[in-house]
Image (spheres, coloured by chain):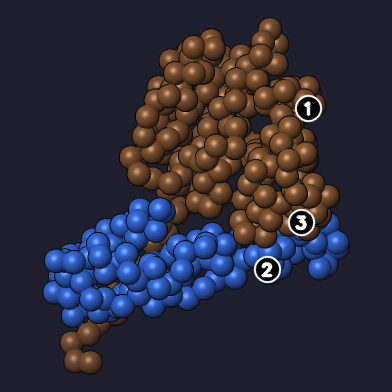
Amino acid sequence: MHEMPITESILNIVLKHAVMNKASKVMAVHLQIGRLSDLEDEWLQRYFDYLSKGTIAEGAKLEIERMPIVVRCDACSTSYEAQVDKIGNLVCPSCGAENGTLVSGREYYIKSMEVQ
Amino acid sequence: MAGVKLIEVKEEIMADNAKQAETIRVELHGEKTMLLNLMSSPGSGKTSLILRTMEGLKGSFNLGVIEADIDSTVDAEKVVAAGAPAVQLKTGGFCHLDATMVRQGLDALTEKNFDLIIIENVGNLVCPAEFDTGAHKNVMILSVPEGDDKPLKYPLMFSVCDLLLINKTDYLALSDFDINALRKRVLVLNPKIVILEISCKTGAGIDAWIDWLKKEIEDFKK
């Protein structure tokens, strides 16, 4: 289950920044996750709760913002938003070309965190 | 709340994987070795396809194989017994391969000068679709006993692949699997995907797969 390695990476980065900032407790973590990820918010929180037991991040709330899937047209360089069920069927709204490069939508970005 | 402060973190978790994957792709391109990521459910015929592919490429292209499973080395043993260099990665519970694990596999393949390296990913239609392995081509197998509704349940996998092989077509007569319905469902997700029907057991359709693969390798080397 890849919830585990991803949540572990999140926790490691959170703890690293907590130490760097001499925090005694992590209250919340603000994440941006691309819509191409199929990880459920609820499960991420459960894994985080499990892995963070006994650390200063125990009990921290994950605040998850879902980020749109953005594609740049290979032909005319227009950037446009795509829906998850249309990702294999891209059509540029500007020129109609079907080939595009994914700009964002897969990310797991830790934006900030609230600490004491 | 008193005493709470906001810390800017700004770190991307998957950034390392994306970078590592791109490094692998560029490096192998320089060596003219095409890397193919083979994905499917458990038991759909990945290892059988690799054995058929070894026969089909014999005398034309050098093939290496990276096997990945949560445990056991049975797949790599089969491939080595059939005569191709293979390494087995044990993912230790991980449901997919990432670029770092692929790098370990590439380093463990001691022979060089491969025209094609096939990664046999962990049997799973969910997680492998999310992780860039550094492969130049992504291929998936769906076998007839799994049912024609799988594109509805696992859309991302069908969206990221260049080729879909429908395996175990020798079971079609015994099943209510609707190939036309499947094709429609897949093409809505991914109109550019190539769909071939094969049976690793009888050998039906294997020639078309080998032809596709040879052409891809030749184009890659240009």
Q: Which residue is mark 3?
A: B185
How many C-alpha atoms fall within 10 Å of the one at disc 3: few (<14), some, or many (≥20)? some
The colour of chain B is brown
- Kindly identify the residue that appears in the image at 83 percent across and 57 percent down: A97
Give coordinates of residue A42: x percent, y percent.
40, 73
Q: Secondary structure at mark 1?
A: loop
Residue B110, numbered label: none
Which of labels 2 and 3 is toward the front?
3
Answer above or below: position of B189 versus A54: above
Q: Quadrant of the C terminus of chain B?
A: top right
Q: Which three-letter amino acid code belongs to the residue tagged 2?
A: Gln
- Kindly identify the residue that appears in the image at 52 percent across and 40 percent down: B42
Q: Which chain is blue?
A: A
Chain ID at mark 1 = B
Residue A83, numbered label: 2
Q: Quadrant of residue A12?
A: bottom left
Give coordinates of residue A64: x percent, y percent.
43, 75
Q: Earlier in the sequence, mark 3 or mark 1?
A: 3
Q: Which three-letter amino acid code belongs to the residue tagged 1?
A: Gly
How many C-alpha atoms fall within 10 Å of the one at disc 2: few (<14), some, or many (≥20)? some
- Kindly identify the residue that appears in the image at 78 percent across and 27 percent down: B205
Chain ID at mark 2 = A
Chain ID at mark 3 = B
Q: Which residue is mark 1?
A: B205
